[in-house]
Amino acid sequence: MTTYQIGVLNGDGIGPEIVGATIEIFKTAVRKFEMGVEWIELPMGWDGIKKYNDPLPDITKKALASCDGWILGPHDSAAYPEKYKSKRNPSGELRHTLDLYANIRPSKTMPGIKSLVGEVDLVIYRENTEGFYADRNMYVGTGEWKVTPEVVLSTGVFTKKAAMRIAHAAFKMAMKRKKKVTIVHKANVITLGMGLFLDTCREVALQYPNVTVDDYHIDAMAAHLVRRAKDFDVIVTENMFGDILSDLAGELVGSLGLSPSINTNDRQAMAQAAHGSAPDIAGKNKANPIGMILSTVMLMEWLSQYHKDEKLYELGKLVETAVFSVLEDKICTRDLGGNATTSEFTRAIINNIEKASVSIKTR
Ligand code: ATP
């Protein structure tokens, strides 16, 4: 029996509560499938600072290098002491150093959750290593320079290599979905950088003749998402546009707190909920763990494909179905208008998993 090594990075704020809930749920599901998964807890955030004087200590980075994947809780880097603020935050550092170039962020209507834009099922492929994120663009330094107290230069970097690989990832996914890709850019203003991104995506599109392609400027796309989100399927865009657009899409279909994501470099994947560490409700048993749980479902689906192991896919589906069934029963945490605590909500999901009968289908 293969044993998968999954890193567990609890992080700050509500991190330990939502990551803890996720692990408890997945441990129950793993037992059902009689699978081998080793959950390896690693320091990150305040835990890393206290033990190793580093929010992302070397011991964690080294251990992750041999993990099949990992679960990254949120971090409260804005609250870290000044000396850590000039460095990339833990999530940025992992994306940069491990070259996790594709941030895949689906937005889909969920049972029992009110969507502002009707039935939607889209996925954003966000380039994760360069673009307008200045701190991702340098070998050393933050990518920003203060020329005078009132003038700052921030670097944006666009390379053909990065555009090409995120475009291929998006088009491959489109082939499994509705065969439609929308490229989002601002090539009318950032003519060279965004022009290169757009032209490269169009060049890649030629290798996928069955996929319909269109493109929009980021500002127009924000309006189109609000007006007719259901018309979109796979969206590919640069780093910062992808970050903003996916928050918008997540909120449109219900709540940003429900939005899952994974980051991948084709060899490993990192599950990461789209929301932050919510320090205002940390430790109060109020956090909604859905974003973290569904990110881990995505991680299992990714691992299933990578290792050609159908059990991992079924494991993810079992958990996803259990979450949706709890929502259908109108059991919700407070952010969704319910009154279930994090532990009550988690227990309800576990009860569903324990009741379910499992079988492995071949797709
Ligand atoms: P970051 O900059 O780290 O992404 P942020 O400052 O944008 O974080 P969040 O930490 O995501 O913000 O919190 C924004 C609001 O959403 C807060 O009121 C927080 O309590 C709420 N929130 C975020 N995540 C959750 C969750 N999982 N469950 C319930 N409420 C949440």
Image (cartoon, rainbow, N blue to C red):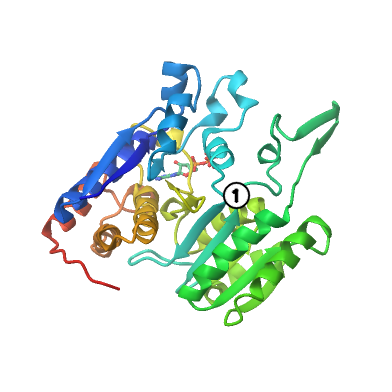
Residue for point 38% across, 48% down: 292
Residue for point 32% across, 37% down: 17
Residue 46 in view: no
Against 247, residue 108 (above or below) is below
In which quadrant will I find the C terminus?
bottom left
Residue 126 in view: yes
Q: Quadrant of residue 99?
A: top right
Q: Which residue is mark 1?
A: 128
Circle count: 1
- x, y (%) of residue 59? 43, 25
Against 221, residue 136 (above or below) is above
Q: Quadrant of residue 16?
A: top left
- x, y (%) of residue 95? 55, 42
Say what secondary structure mark 1 lies in.
loop
**Residue located farthest toward the front when viewing the structure as drawn:** 1
Residue for point 40% across, 38% down: 66
